[in-house]
Image (cartoon, rainbow, N blue to C red):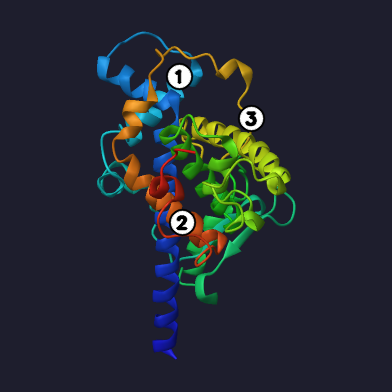
Amino acid sequence: MGVSVLTGIVQSTKRHWAVAMASARLYYNYLRLSPSYAAGCVYRLRKSSRRLNRHSAKVLACVDKYRDVHKTSFDEWVRGPGSVRISLPNVMPEIQTAQTLTVGHQSDLYVRFPQGRNAMPLMELLTMISAQVPSVSKESATLRLTPVMQKNLWRDLYLAYLIKNYPGVELWRLGAEAMLVDRFIGKVEPTGRRMNSSQDHERRLLVATVIRHRTWAANISEHAAIDKFPCKAVLPNDQQCFDFEARDLLPCLAVHSMEEAMHAREQVIRCTGAVGKVSLEPSLKQQGVLF
């Protein structure tokens, strides 16, 4: 009995660790995409003492916490400042909210007992519950990282790298390469001839999908710059005027970009179940963009 419980705990720990690492890598990449975060990195290097507005101060606090993600690989980052994004699995009881579980009323609280057992002394458990019940955070706008959400985040990320690498390519080709529409995977070729009138509907739908996903990625990256991830809420207009100088992202993204783009593509293939439907090599990289 004890061995089976221990085995279950080990397996659960491995699953939680894999989920935590995937979430950390997504966050790392969306920080790299954020113009605000890039500008904040430059501002911090100049060591200016100029007074900043509220939103810029939040971005700068995030920069101080996670450092310059443009100058380090993910493996180095996750062992350094990014280690705070890895939450180790806990066998102790924990409080979960309805927002995390996506059930019940938003003010509901739930107590979770890993493996269905209580490893905490009764009085400590009651004290923890008593401390948590009175306060419910109203400012938390982050979403639970569901499989669908994770799939879309990796798609948006891969699309962002494709747009950077192939700025002159038609949007429907980028959408097909990024596998944005499940039913088009393996059917609409990114390097196919544009004269193929039988796929007019598919191409128009892919263009609209690319525009929508590009907007989502930009919005999520800006939330990541103020340490809210993943968050799809629209930023207020008064928080989009920055005290930072504009910064060109292309030189920043060039460092480690191929490594992260290929990893994002692998995750899209995994999340969409496209194994065997698409080539292991990206179509645009394999055949070029001369069409």
Is 117 in front, or is 204? 204
Residue 153 position, x and y percent, is 53, 46
Nearest to the eye among marks 1 and 2: give it: 2
| Residue farthest toward the bottom in the current orientation of the protein | 1
Question: How many numbered marks appear?
Answer: 3
How crowded pointer 1 is (Cα within 10 Å; few <14, some 14-19, many 20+) is rated as many
Residue beneath disc 2: 267
| Residue occupying the point 41% across, 27% down | 37
Residue beneath disc 1: 56
| Residue occupying the point 62% across, 50% down | 133
Q: Could you give the CA–CA distance between mark 1 and mark 3, rounded to whole angstroms?
A: 17 Å
Q: Quadrant of residue 251?
A: top left
Query: At label 2, which amino acid type do we have?
Result: Gln
Residue 222 position, x and y percent, is 51, 30
Sooner in the amino-acid sequence: mark 1 or mark 3: 1
Query: At label 3, which amino acid type do we have?
Result: Val
Height in image: 225 above or below 97?
above
**Left or right of 273, for residue 101:** right
Residue 74 position, x and y percent, is 31, 46
Q: Quadrant of residue 244?
A: top left
- The answer to whether one can see residue 230 in this image is no
Q: Could you give the CA–CA distance between mark 2 and mark 3, rounded to whole angstroms?
A: 26 Å
Q: Could you give the CA–CA distance between mark 1 and mark 2, rounded to whole angstroms?
A: 32 Å
What kind of element bears circle 2? helix
How crowded pointer 3 is (Cα within 10 Å; few <14, some 14-19, many 20+) is rated as few
| Residue occupying the point 51% across, 75% down | 115
**Left or right of 51, for residue 135:** right
The circle drawn on residue 234 is 3
